[in-house]
Amino acid sequence: MKIGEALRQERLRLNLSQSQMAGDVLTKSFYSKVERNLCSIRANDLLSILSLHNIDYSYFFEKLKFENNDNELSETECNNLLHAAYYNNDWSKILKLQELIKQKDTSKFNLDSINAQIIVIKAAISNSLDKISDDEKDRIKRAIFETTNWTESSLRLFFNVYF
């Protein structure tokens, strides 16, 4: 499902007009184009609309499906699940991601980084960062320092481990 479709679905669920859904964030005209997937919405505008109508971010983003092979798992999907798990202290999302990694093709991205983030987030959720084993710490360090392309994910992992 695309963002526009998900917004439309939420608007109809809330029984709102497009003007009401857009609020003071977007014009009705632009919002209509977003719903029809003719225009992209900026992240901060999307979050403002979701907040305006008390729509849970993780609930909304869970509805979005990425267009790819059914047997392929994207790094974006992994990161979305990781973010949702971390910010909602949701152990079940971590378990879901671990299951998906086992079942799907993950050959197109750095699985070491994702696994390192899983270790850190599990420990953070259970308030046991200090109990991460030495082997796991070494894996996390390798994932951080072997990164040649510092992405948001690798920076987030670095921050969570060292701060």
Image (cartoon, grey):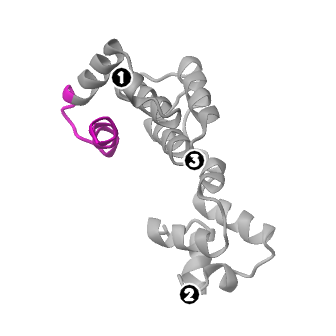
Q: Residue at x 66, y 53 (%)?
A: 59
Q: Which residue is mark 1?
A: 112
Corner quadrant of residue 34:
bottom right
Mark carried by residue 88: 3
Which quarter shows the C terminus? top left
Sequence-wise first label, 1 or 3:
3
Q: Residue at x 58, y 85 (%)?
A: 29
Q: Position of residue 62 (x, y in %)?
A: 63, 48
Q: Amino acid at mark 1?
A: Asp
Q: Residue at x 56, y 42 (%)?
A: 89
Q: CA distance from mark 1 to mark 2?
A: 43 Å
Residue furthest out toward the top: 135
Residue 117 visible in the shown view: yes
* Residues at marks 1 and 3 touching, judged by CB atoms closer than 8 Å: no
Q: CA distance from mark 2 to mark 3?
A: 28 Å
Q: Residue at x 59, y 70 (%)?
A: 51
Q: What residue span does the magenta drawing correspond to?
A: 145-163
Label 3 crowd (10 A; few <14 / some 14-19 / many >=20): few
